[in-house]
Amino acid sequence: MNQGQYATPSYGAVAHADVDTRASFIAKTYGHLAGMIAVFVAFIGLLLATGAAEALALLVYGEGRGQFGHLIFLGLFAVTSTMADRWARRSTDVRTQYLASAVYLGLEALFIAPMIFIATVMAGPGLPMQAFLITGVLFAALTLVVFVTRKDFSFLRSAMIFLTIAILGAAVGAAVFNFQLPVLILWAGVVLAAMSILYSTSGVMLHYREGQHVAASLSLFASFALLLWYVLQLLMSSRD
């Protein structure tokens, strides 16, 4: 892995292609990402409107099961992010990429919608809107860092794995012994999400191949959703 100021693109990556091909790939990737976020928001809105989010909140977070819900969410992120990365590196089958995207988007909405319902009950709709706004701003800022510096952040992978294991360990302890996660762990989750955004964005710039724009957008969406989750958790903890 190159940790220098300027990255060396992976062999066969779209970064080696001509300017028009690179621009088209980036446009497709972020166009799909925007579409995924729009569908994600719409699906969450549907879950809230139909009462499904409330039912899921009782099922996942009710009666002392909140920390298990957190544990499931982290596990979902870790497994799906790894799968997305592997599919992206090994296959240009767009159908496989679309299937992975649809499954992951649906699962993310099913896990985040109950938390948004709880946040809305706690502090009104303004809190989830604030969480989305903060997440969007941070995501855009971190994306800009990668696009401006063109630095290869793939070296963050080991740190991300270590931090994920540490947070999962804390979540397991919280679930088993039924205590709330410290705010420090929530901040660690924000750091993990920020590293994931840098890692995924540099992958788009330097390592993905042409035809892998759907998988690339899935990787970015996973990072966006993780950041949203922890920003929402931190805002809710500040209201306790």
Image (cartoon, grey):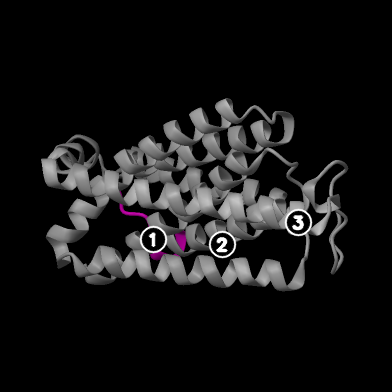
Of the pair 24 and 86, the residue shown nearer to us: 24
User: Where residue 20 is drawn, which disc sits there?
Assistant: 3
Q: Amino acid at mark 3?
A: Asp
Q: Is residue 211 above or below residue 40?
A: above
Other residues around mark 1 within 10 Å, as few (<14) / some (14–19) / many (≥20): few
- The answer to whether residue 143 is left or right of residue 178 is right
In this view, the residue in front, 186 or 97, is 97
Q: Which residue is mark 1?
A: 182
Indicate whether 107 appears above or below 44: above
* Res. 156 visible in picture: no
Q: Is residue 184 above or below residue 22?
A: below
| Residue type indicated by callout 1 | Pro
Q: Position of residue 132 (x, y in %)?
A: 35, 64
Q: CA distance from mark 3 to mark 2?
A: 29 Å
Q: Which residue is mark 2?
A: 194
Give how far across and how far down residue 92 sits, in percent. 69, 31
Quadrant of residue 55 in the image? top left
SS for callout 3: helix
Q: Quadrant of the C terminus?
A: bottom left
Judge left or right: residue 131 versus residue 93. Answer: left
Q: Is residue 35 inside the magenta stretch?
A: no
Give the Cα distance between marks 1 and 2. 19 Å
**Can the viewer see residue 100?**
yes
Report the residue at 66% width, 72% height from top.
145
Q: Which is more N-terminal, label 1 or label 3?
A: 3
